């Protein structure tokens, strides 16, 4: 396409870029979402928390359909995994005689095959190691979905916190599912019932209630 | 002046049965009362000729255990607040000295613990009650000043009402010439203006604890007030009576008053009701509504509260509310019982029963 100045200026573009590309962005969001479902309150950068919010609420909407629904189960299976190692070099022997130790991981997705070195009988492969969190899927369907049954939307809460102490001074935020067992982020401010104006209003309300009751009785 | 009094009842009550001719002008009366008050105040101050120091421990948010060295018999909680910040001076309405409510301009006489109360504390019920009393006292003062010198105004007293009743009130009796007088819109507005002027002057309410004889001397021209003095002296623990002065008006009150008139911001006299013939003439009840400067109401809210305050408030129904106020349990039981007993012995001004 034509290399115009408008391509470089991003005014009005709402889609965020994260990580190395769109796939990397989804992987990162998947990690963060798994952490959110596991811990119910997490702390990340502002942009990532804002991005994850949409997916977190959509996941709850799918979970509300129930675990018998195939689409919901597929979604839960896809999103509730954690990427442990991204594109690491794994020494794999060409003979395939000794099996790959499966005790460490449930399954291993090869990202792309690349014969980087040819070293005698073995080769290096680029793999991504995924860890499927088996116990988060029942938690999603059995704990989180019933919690938000009554609410149509708004299952998450985001609050900004002071910037990170590192050199980057990144803007940080806390993202949580409502109804979590932790103490509240921002305690609700209650107005004092005993101030003069509140006492006057209380008397006023009581009198109105009395009058309403008297009206009902007389009719 | 040939005053046509309301029949035999009144003559029985009054000791000085001569009509209003002998009575001096209201300005003179107030001046005389104020002079006696000042004399007594100077006498009480002269009891501490040498400056002695007392230790005052402050309690409050951010102030726990602050020690102030103040002067005995001279320093007031107001002066303690002046040692802190301007906010403390402006916002404190009442003080708690060793747990008992203390007017802000009353001198401290011994080492004690002090906490300054404002309208926005966690539990401002004491301050609210004191504010209600002070507004009623202000109303009485306005009424005394409002009428011309030839018409007499007798303040009967301030009934103790809780804040939830919606209005504070002041009972008074006008000159019999004004028996047929009913307040018009303009007269209500002029009363409100009088009150606003007093508020604008920001006069402090000075308190003084005196023996009943001095109090009787102060109110020598008013039999009704003297009866009230005797009642209060009988009720109090040590037989003394507390007088309050604002400007040049001296008055009695059922409890501590707030620091100064400038604390009120929204103030309106809402209604003057007739209570019917009583011991001193045609009893009337003036009602008003007020809010302090920290708790101002939006005009929509104010209008609703004001319309409620125009209705007559009666005290009998609200006696029970006082049971739950801090430290007033026993006092409230006495207050509940004494009207019942007194109505058997002699008709008091409270037991009117017209409403």
Image (cartoon, coloured by chain):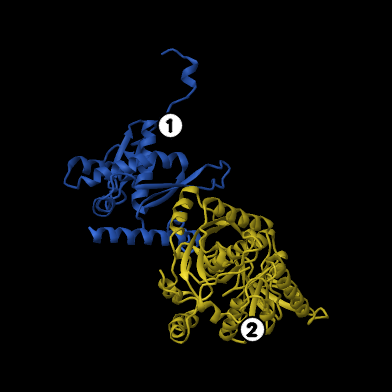
Q: According to the colouring, which chain is yellow?
A: B
Q: Give the x, y percent position of residue A187.
A: 45, 57
Task: Please report, as a chain letter, where disc 1 is located.
Answer: A
Q: Residues within 10 Å of mark 2 (few under 14, many from 20)?
A: many
Q: Residue at x 55, y 67 (%)?
A: B176
Q: Tell me whether marks 1 and 2 sit on the same chain.
A: no
Which quadrant of the figure contains the N terminus of chain B? Answer: bottom right
Q: Is residue B320 left or right of residue B108?
A: left
- Please give the residue where the numbered disc 2 appears in the rendered image: B240
Could you tell me how many numbered marks the image carries? 2
Residue, far top? A2
Q: Report the front residue among B250 and B15.
A: B15
For this view, does A84 lie left or right of residue B156?
A: left
The quarter of the picture where residue B38 lies is bottom right
- Identify the secondary structure beneath mark 2: loop
Q: Can the viewer see residue B116?
A: no
Colour used to depict chain A in the structure image: blue
Identify residue for label 1: A17
| Residue B95 image offset from top left, x and y in percent | 62, 71
B190, B239: nearer the viewer: B190
The chain that hosts pointer 2 is B
């Amino acid at each position: 396409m034509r290399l115009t100045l408008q391509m470089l200026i991003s005014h009005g573009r709402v889609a965020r870029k994260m990580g190395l590309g769109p796939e990397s962005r989804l992987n990162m969001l998947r990690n963060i979402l798994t952490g959110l479902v596991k811990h119910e309150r997490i702390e990340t950068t502002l942009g990532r928390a804002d991005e994850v919010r949409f997916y977190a609420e959509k996941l709850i909407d799918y979970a509300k359909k129930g675990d018998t629904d195939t689409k919901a189960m597929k979604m839960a299976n896809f999103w509730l995994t954690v990427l442990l190692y991204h594109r690491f070099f794994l020494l794999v022997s060409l003979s395939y005689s000794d099996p790959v130790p499966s005790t460490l991981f449930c399954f291993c997705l090869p990202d792309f095959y690349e014969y980087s070195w040819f070293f005698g009988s073995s080769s290096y492969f680029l793999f991504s190691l995924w860890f499927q969190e088996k116990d988060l899927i029942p938690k999603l369907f059995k704990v989180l979905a019933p919690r938000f049954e009554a609410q149509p939307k708004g299952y998450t809460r985001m609050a900004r916190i002071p910037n990170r102490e590192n050199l980057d001074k990144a803007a940080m935020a806390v993202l949580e599912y409502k109804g979590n067992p932790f103490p509240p982020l921002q305690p609700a401010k209650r107005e004092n019932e005993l101030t003069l104006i509140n006492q006057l209003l209380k008397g006023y309300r009581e009198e109105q209630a009395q009058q309403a009751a008297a009206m009902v009785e007389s009719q | 002046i040939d005053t046509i009094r309301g029949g035999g009842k009144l003559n029985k009550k009054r000791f000085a049965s001569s009509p209003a001719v002998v009575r001096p002008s209201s300005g003179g009366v107030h001046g005389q009362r104020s002079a006696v008050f000042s004399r007594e105040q100077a006498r009480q101050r002269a009891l501490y000729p040498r400056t002695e120091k007392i230790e005052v421990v402050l309690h409050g948010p951010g102030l726990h255990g602050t020690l102030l060295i103040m002067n005995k018999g001279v320093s007031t909680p107001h002066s303690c607040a002046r040692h802190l910040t301007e906010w403390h001076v402006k916002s404190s309405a009442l003080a708690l000295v060793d747990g008992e409510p203390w007017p802000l301009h009353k001198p401290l006489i011994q080492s004690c613990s002090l906490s300054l109360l404002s309208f926005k504390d966690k539990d401002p019920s004491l301050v609210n009650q004191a504010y209600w009393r002070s507004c009623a006292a202000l109303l009485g003062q306005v009424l005394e000043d409002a009428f011309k010198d030839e018409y007499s105004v007798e303040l009967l007293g301030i009934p103790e009402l809780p804040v939830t009743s919606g209005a504070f009130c002041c009972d008074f009796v006008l000159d019999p010439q004004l028996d047929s007088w009913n307040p018009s819109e303009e007269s209500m507005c002029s009363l409100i203006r009088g009150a606003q002027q007093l508020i604008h002057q920001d006069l402090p309410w000075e308190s003084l604890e005196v023996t009943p004889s001095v109090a009787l001397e102060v109110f020598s021209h008013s039999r009704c007030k003297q009866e009230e003095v005797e009642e209060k002296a009988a009720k109090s623990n040590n037989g003394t009576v507390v007088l309050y002065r604002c400007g040049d008006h001296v008055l009695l009150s059922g409890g501590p008053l707030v620091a100064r008139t400038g604390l009120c911001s929204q103030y309106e006299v809402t209604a003057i009701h007739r209570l019917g013939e009583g011991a001193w003439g045609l009893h009337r009840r003036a009602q008003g509504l007020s809010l302090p400067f920290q708790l101002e109401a939006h005009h929509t809210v104010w209008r609703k509260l004001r319309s409620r305050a125009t209705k007559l408030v009666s005290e009998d129904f609200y006696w029970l509310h006082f049971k739950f106020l801090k430290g007033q349990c026993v006092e409230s039981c006495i207050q509940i019982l004494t009207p019942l007993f007194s109505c058997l012995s002699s008709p008091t001004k409270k037991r009117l029963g017209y409403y």
